[in-house]
Image: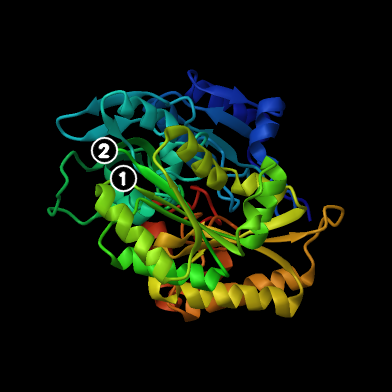
Amino acid sequence: MAIFTAYDNSEILAALQDAAPHAEIHIDDKIAREHSANGNAQREIAGKILAYVAVSDVADIQDVLKIARQYHMPVVPQSADTSTVIGSDGINGSLILSTARMNRIKEISKGDLLAVVEPGVINGDLDKAARAQGLFYAPDPGSKPISSIGGNAATNAGGMSTVKYGATTDNVLGLKVVLADGREIKLGGRTYKHAFSYDLTHLFVGSEGTLGIITEVTVKLNPIPIGTPVVGIAYFDNMTALAKGVEDLRLSGIYPVMLEALDGLTVAALDRYEGTHYAEGAEAMLLFRLDAGGEASLKMAEQILNDDHAKNIKVTSDPKEAAAIIKLRQDMLPAVFANGQHIMEDMAVPLSKLPEMMDYIASVAQDLNVEIYTAGHAGDGNVHPTIIWPADEEEPPKEALQAIRLMFRKALALGGTISGEHAVGMSKNQWNNEELGFDVDEIQHQIKGLFDPLGILNPKRKID
């Protein structure tokens, strides 16, 4: 049966161009195609968008949303386009609303220890600007050089320093957000304590663009610690033993800034990628960093690691050597991905359950005969197992998918989550009932309906 639409695409696009004359609109050109699917949606969605709209201010956003409401069009918020969970890829017939051009650092306040930025500001650029004034921005996802503060807030990004400074949500003081109906609202503020209202600020942090479009973020900054940071490597016989060492370091009171775990396969991949020889140490590598406490903290850390049977403990305060060690963790993903087709996952468990989770991942790999490279932010219980299969096989083998299901369910059984820091997107939205339960899942849908009654904001993301 034929379906007769009231408007064709040319009429909608003409209305969009009239409504938002200052926006940069791309229709079926190279830029539109590049941003429709960043490589994570190739098998899942076609991503045939109507237009890619790069806005430059709040008025542009309000104008685009007005057209979207009028024509009931899905709007996909996007900034740096670095989602790993199909969170900002184009949806058929949608408008991608990009805030990448809204990239001003509006203010860095030393007196208030905060920064006010637009959503398109790159995480690493904010950190550099803060460091020029003796401050720093703590959240440091692996995508720090390329991901935006707006996207970090939308997904509640984590990173290596989460163990001490928390994830993005712990560092956001306030937001400005444009709702689906076009209103811009101000949430939170500039104070470190705020007990007056419902905490709508942190309702929007991690909402993945499903409730509104972030237009401004006020974040905490920290003074650069005095003293010389110490960075080190320690080796263990396996990841379970490493996890015990991490637990003891966390309980010691020395407050490490970084506790990163890499299993033997991952270290070997790094050796191939970097031309190094770290894999000759043992089956698991711990990277750690201490920013405060001086010699006493370092001695305590070394004692704990020795007591937990760590091997070949190496520490350095030399900036170049420390940077080389940190680079190992930063290069982990390209080193692992170079070994074939891959799926990287993102579970987090309570700290005391990390050894059990590590042991379980190893058993799954052995039982199903799949290649699993495991690394992660061990200091906050966040593990990233990556399943690799031959490069000439496009589709993952059934054993790989089974391994993911088993690891997800084990993380949940241990009181954890199947998304520690990468958000939900479309990759995991079918797991809401299993992780949250029916009642909470239903409440999330009700919240979505309150803020976005037409369901135009990033549909099918976060919740199904």
The three-letter code of the residue at mark 1 reads: Asp
x%, y% of residue 106? 30, 24
264 displayed left or right of 305: right
Q: Quick check: marks 1 and 2 in contact, CB under 8 Å?
A: yes
- Label drawn at residue 227: 2
Label 1 element class? loop
x%, y% of residue 187? 24, 44
151 displayed left or right of 335: left
Quadrant housing the N terminus: bottom right
Most distant residue in the left direction: 196
Most distant residue in the top direction: 22
Q: How far apart are marks 1 and 2 (CA)?
A: 7 Å
The three-letter code of the residue at mark 2 reads: Gly
x%, y% of residue 305? 41, 64
Determine which residue is flagged by label 1: 291
Q: Looking at the image, which residue is at 13% across and 54% down?
A: 195
Q: How crowded is mark 1: few (under 14 residues within 10 Å), some or many (20 or more)?
A: some
